[in-house]
Amino acid sequence: MNKKGYGQMPDVMNYLWKIFLIIIVFIFVLIVANSALNMSFDTFETEANILSYRLLYSKDGISYYDPEVERVYPGIIDLEKFVDTKQIEEKLIETIDYTADPDHLVARMEIFDNELWNLEPVYLNRKYFLRWYPIAMAEGKGKGAASIIEKTYYVLLKDNRTRRLWLLENFKEDTELRRSWDTLIKPQYDNLKENYNYADVQYIPAKLVITIVRPNS
Amino acid sequence: MSILTQMKRYVSVKSYLIKNNIKSVHSDLCMRGKILGKKGEEDPQHETLMNINELVLLSLLLLMLFGFLSSISTGKIMVKEYLSRDLAMVIDTLYIPPYDTPYMYDGGDESLSEYNFEFTDGKVTVSEVNAEKGSPVKLWYPFARDNNIVIHQFPSLANDVIEMRKKEHDFYIGTSEDSQQMLICPQIDTKDPDWKAKDFVIDPGHGGDDTGYSANIGESIFTRELSYEFSEYLKTFGVHSTATRKLKADEGMTFSERKGKVSPDSFLISFHMGYDTNKYFVPIKIYANKKYYETNAKFVCILYNKLFEELKGYSEISVDYVDLSLIPKDDPRQILDETKNIGLFIEIGNSQHPEGILLTKSTYGTLSRLIFESMESYYE
């Protein structure tokens, strides 16, 4: 207290208010400077390209790989890999492993042929893809959202019997052809299933769609 | 009272003090009551201190702002961000081809020697070499690791480039950091007091019309000179050796003639020059016969560790046990099949390197000494 009986507290409050104001101004300047400088790079498209090439062209990817001659046949998809999706997905997780950031990039590979024969898709990191895909489709912006890129490739499916078995199986469902199932088709089906020739390979034109999703962080 | 008003008052106080030659602010201002208005209205000492505090705080905040802007303007954060991302994508790309892939990363316009690089736990971490101790700012970016391929980071000779090479199940990344490890050698008894009397055979690779690689220095000349140096070195320690061709003059001998000079009991060392299309890759490669792995393992391990200790600043040192039945019959390494004793085929340096590192005479003596010391360690 001074002589007139005024306290010191109002001065201290005034002082604190000034400090608070200075800090607010400082933070504002910092934010403006930071946003104006834009220090982030967007490399998603390049990374998506690299990942799709890796899925397509590496020996542990989805393309046909002949271990005898250690050669990958780019553009030829090994259909056998799409029959047991669990096995190929485990292999992909092992060979394309984002350890430091597990959902850095996730992908789905779908095959469509001209008869709309849709195989079950193969995923790179199924759990995270199913989590982020709906968020990416919502087309949100900023943190918490996700970006999406779709890559389409025209490929050949290398098939020994998988697709033919499927076609024959479909006859069972067809009302007109169901009658000839036992007499005509089933013997073919059984023969193909049990005594097929590995060298008897068919190449079927198809479309491969690789969908790559990246959470924004 | 606004800051502006206080500052104006501060300036008027200062001029008043100077004008009246007053040194003690407290006594004069408080007693005369000329600065802060009516007596008892405010505590002048308190007010002045407050003003000084405000100025100090403002200066500190401005300094922090300038520091932040300065770190951006020098570009270190941006460069680290860029390098980590770029390297991560390069690694991802190199994983794609199924065959061996060499690559030299030069960082574009950036000087790589100013940064440290780590390639562990599926991420590329970049930090500054000259960062302040205690808090170097590290930036990292993930890459998709292939768990079937082991990443080896090794010290590199090349300036301002990062050597990368994917080779079957190994991915070699050469940086200036020292990460290659020494080997733990087999603990088996190989003592032999009479070891100096053994049949030591030195094979200088190629010779005569067969000059070997001849880009910068003829391989046959290099192997002959190195072999001569080595045999002379052994001689000074009382170890006699024979050579598969003349060491003082270039003598044309066929490969089978040279092989004929190696007996099943010979301790064989065959010198060759390395070759790699990647001119900055300067390795030392030790090949031994896979069939006699147990005979060779301890000596190879000792030699590897000696080379590693002495030459770790140079380049990659590797050991390969070769199945000779799988390589062509005219491959120079087939000479290893002539002995059942220790037999090494050593490829040194890279004939394509512009400076011929490891191929100069100054390193002949070092290599000779290291091989001899390995012999001593093995037998004594």
Image: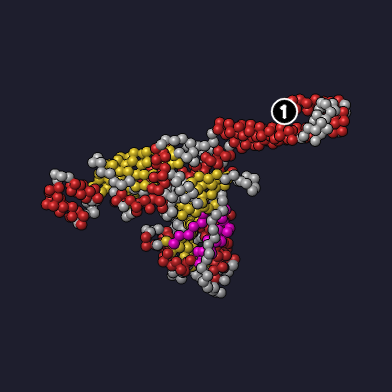
Where does the image place residue B57, in percent across and percent down from the top left?
Answer: 70, 35
Residue A128 inside the magenta-drawn segment? no
Q: Quadrant of the C terminus of chain B?
A: bottom right
A142 vs A211, nearest the viewer: A142
Residue topped by disc 1: B3
Q: Nearer the viewer, residue B287 or A50?
A: A50
Q: Name the one closer to the observer, B280 or B160.
A: B160
Label 1 lies in what chain? B
In the orientation shown, which residue stands out farthest toward the bottom?
B193
* Visible residue check, residue B145: yes
Residue A6, percent across and down? 78, 32
Q: Amino acid at mark 1?
A: Ile
- Density class for disc 1 (Cα within 10 Å; few <14, some 14-19, many ≥20) is few
**Residue range (magenta):** B298-321
Identify the image quadrant of the N terminus of chain B.
top right
Q: Residue at 71% of width from left, 32% of height from top?
A: A14
On whether residue B313 falls in the magenta region, the answer is yes
x 18%, y 48%: residue: A172
User: Which one is nearer the viewer's eye here, B68 or A186?
Assistant: A186
